[in-house]
Image: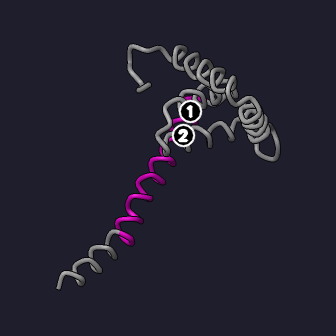
């Protein structure tokens, strides 16, 4: 389901939970293991949950995973992140995303162009 302004954030969360519940009916052990793993990954440790949620949000933005963007935005707010903390974190994700494009363009694409041009001559 593509994110649409008319669909509420709560509807997206419900849609995700319903989808996961349906998937769990056919793959109960896998979903259970995934849920346990996710809970362990986001539990407090040396890194507090607040920062883990910020990381989750940035990674979900970078990977363009709309459901996770919503889920981790809620997680950030639930863990007490300020709007400014969220916005600054998004800036880091944008820098990495742009950096990934730049680094690939400067290396792999550049090398590909050079090698492919040589093959044509």
Q: Which residues are magenta?
A: 82-108
* Quarter holding residue 2: top left
- Residue 89 is situated, as x and y percent measured from the top left of the image, at 55, 42
Q: Residue furthest front?
A: 26
Q: Tags 2 and 1 in contact by the CB under 8 Å rule?
A: yes
Write down the residue under mark 1: 68
Q: Going by the picture, which residue comes out furthest to the right?
A: 45
Q: Is residue 21 above or below residue 96?
A: above
**Which of the pair 31/77 is nearer the observer?**
31
Name the colouring of the figure. one colour
Q: CA distance from mark 2 to mark 1?
A: 6 Å
Does 63 lie within the magenta span? no
Looking at the rendered structure, the secondary structure element under dot 1 is helix
Q: Position of residue 99 (x, y in %)?
A: 43, 58
How far across and down, in percent of the image, does residue 27 sit?
70, 31
Nearest the eye: 12 or 59: 12
Magenta residues, dominant SS class: helix
Q: Residue at x 65, y 36 (%)?
A: 53
The tag on residue 58 is none
- Where does label 2 land, which residue? 60
Residue 4 placement, left or right of 54: left
Residue visible at 58% across and 36% down in the picture: 85
* Residue 107 magenta: yes
Question: In this view of the protein, which residue sits in the foreground, 111 or 80?
Answer: 111
Please report whichever mark, 2 or 1, sits nearer to the chain's N-terminal start.
2
Q: Quadrant of the C terminus?
A: bottom left
Residue 37's quadrant in the figure?
top right
In this rendering, the count of numbered labels is 2
Mark 2 element type: helix
Q: Position of residue 101 (x, y in %)?
A: 39, 58
Q: Classify mark 1: residues with Cα within 10 Å, few (<14), some (14-19) or many (20+).
A: many
């Amino acid at each position: 389901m593509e994110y649409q302004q008319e669909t509420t954030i709560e509807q997206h969360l419900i849609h995700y939970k319903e989808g996961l519940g349906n998937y769990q009916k056919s793959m109960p052990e896998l979903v259970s293991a995934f849920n346990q793993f996710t809970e362990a990954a986001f539990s407090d440790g040396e890194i507090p949950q607040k920062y883990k949620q910020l990381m989750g949000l940035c990674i979900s933005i970078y990977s363009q995973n709309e459901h996770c963007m919503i889920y981790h935005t809620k997680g950030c707010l639930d863990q007490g992140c300020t709007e400014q903390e969220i916005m600054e974190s998004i800036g880091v994700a944008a820098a990495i995303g742009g950096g990934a494009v730049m680094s690939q363009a400067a290396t792999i694409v550049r090398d590909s162009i050079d090698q492919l041009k040589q093959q044509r001559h």
